[in-house]
Amino acid sequence: MANGNPVFDRLNKQIEKERYAGFGAPPPQGSPYQGTQPATGGYAAQQTLSADQLNEMYARQSAGPVDTGRVTLDDVVMKSLSLFALLVAAGGVTWFMVDKTPSLASPLWLGGMLVGLGLGLAIAFMRKVVVPLIVLYAIAEGVFLGAFSFAINSVEKYQGVVPTAVLATVCTFAAMYAGYATGLIKVTSKARRMFTIAIGGYMIFLLLQFVLQMFGVLGGWGFGGSGGLGIVISLFGTGLAAYSLAIDFDSIDQAVKMGAPRKYSWLLAHGLIVSVVWLYIEFVRLFARMRD
C-alpha cells in the first residue's frame, strides 16, 4: 500500500526482508529446542525431545511481542515521553539562559532550527535507526523552541501567545487521538496520498518564504502578513499539522499489528515529536497573527 509516511514505508520494506514471528530463527538460549536439529515433520520433531522437555515446552506461555523483539504500544509511548522530556528540559534551560542573556535568543533559535532540520533530514533518509541522532534532534528542537518562545513572549503584544499555543497543542493532540481511537477520524490510502501532496507543497512554500525573508524581500510573518490571507495560511498549516498526528497514530497502530522490529519504536516516537513541535509552531504563528 503506497502512502506518504516515510517511517511506515521503511517498516513495510523491512518486514518484507526479515521474519519477526520466529519462524526459521534459531532457538533462543535456554529453549528445550536448543541443541536439536530441525525436523521436517511435527511427529519427527517430537521424537527428538524427552518427556520432560515436552512438558516444559507446553507449560510455557506464548511468546509475546517483547519476547520476539517486536514493537509494542508501550515501547512507543515510553520512548515518546522520554524524547518529550528531553525536549522540554532543553527548552527550559534555553529559556533560562536567554532570560539572563537576551542577546542569545536569535543565535540559539536559528542554530537550533538549522541543526534540527539537518538531523531531521538525516533521520528520515538513513537506512538504519540511529538512536543518538533521534535524541540529539529532541535536544536541538528543545533549544530552538526555548529561544523562539522566549523571543515571542518578550514582545509585549504577543505576551500570552506561548501558553495559549501550548494549551491549544495539548487539546488538539487529545482531540485527534480521541477522534482516531473512536473512528471519527479516518486514515486511508487516499488520505495519505493527499496529505503527502499537501505537505510537500506546503514545505516548498515555507522554504521559499524563509529564503525571501532572509534576503529582506518579505518581513514579519511572511506571505499574507497578519491580514486575512496570512491567517488563512496559518489555519491551513495548523490543519495539516493536526492531521499529521492522525497519520502518526495510524502508523503506530499498523506497525504494532504487523510486528515491526522493536527498534522502530524510536522512529515512530520521533515522528510523533516532529508533529507535536510543528503543531505548536503553527499555533504560535496563528495566534501572533491574530494579535496583530
Image: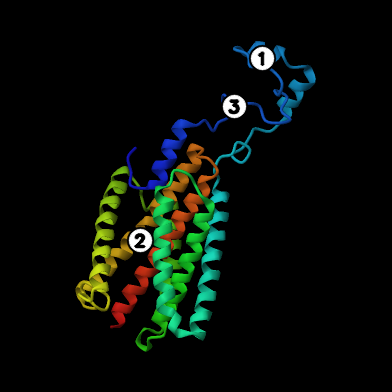
> Residue 29: x percent and y percent?
71, 31
Quadrant of the rendering where the N terminus is positioned: top left
Residue 25 disc label: 3
Q: Name the residue under label 2.
A: 241
> Residue 153: x percent and y percent?
41, 82
Image height of 182 relative to 223, above or below: above
Q: Which residue is drawn at 24% across and 62% down?
A: 205
- Is the residue marked by circle 3 packed among few (<14), some (14-19), or many (20+) residues within 10 Å? few
Say which element carries label 3.
loop
> Residue 100: x percent and y percent?
52, 85
Q: Distance between the residues labelled 1 and 3?
A: 16 Å
Image height of 132 relative to 91, above or below: above
User: Can residue 176 be seen in this snapshot?
Assistant: no
Whichever of labels 1 and 3 marks the residue nearer the N terminus, that label is 3
* Residue 160 in which image quadrant: bottom left
Give yes or no for contact between labels 1 and 2 (Cβ–Cβ under 8 Å). no
Q: Choose between 91 and 285: the one closer to the eye.
A: 91
Whichever of labels 3 and 2 marks the residue nearer the N terminus, that label is 3
Say which element carries label 2.
helix
Q: Name the residue under label 1.
A: 45
The amino acid type of the residue labelled 2 equals Ala
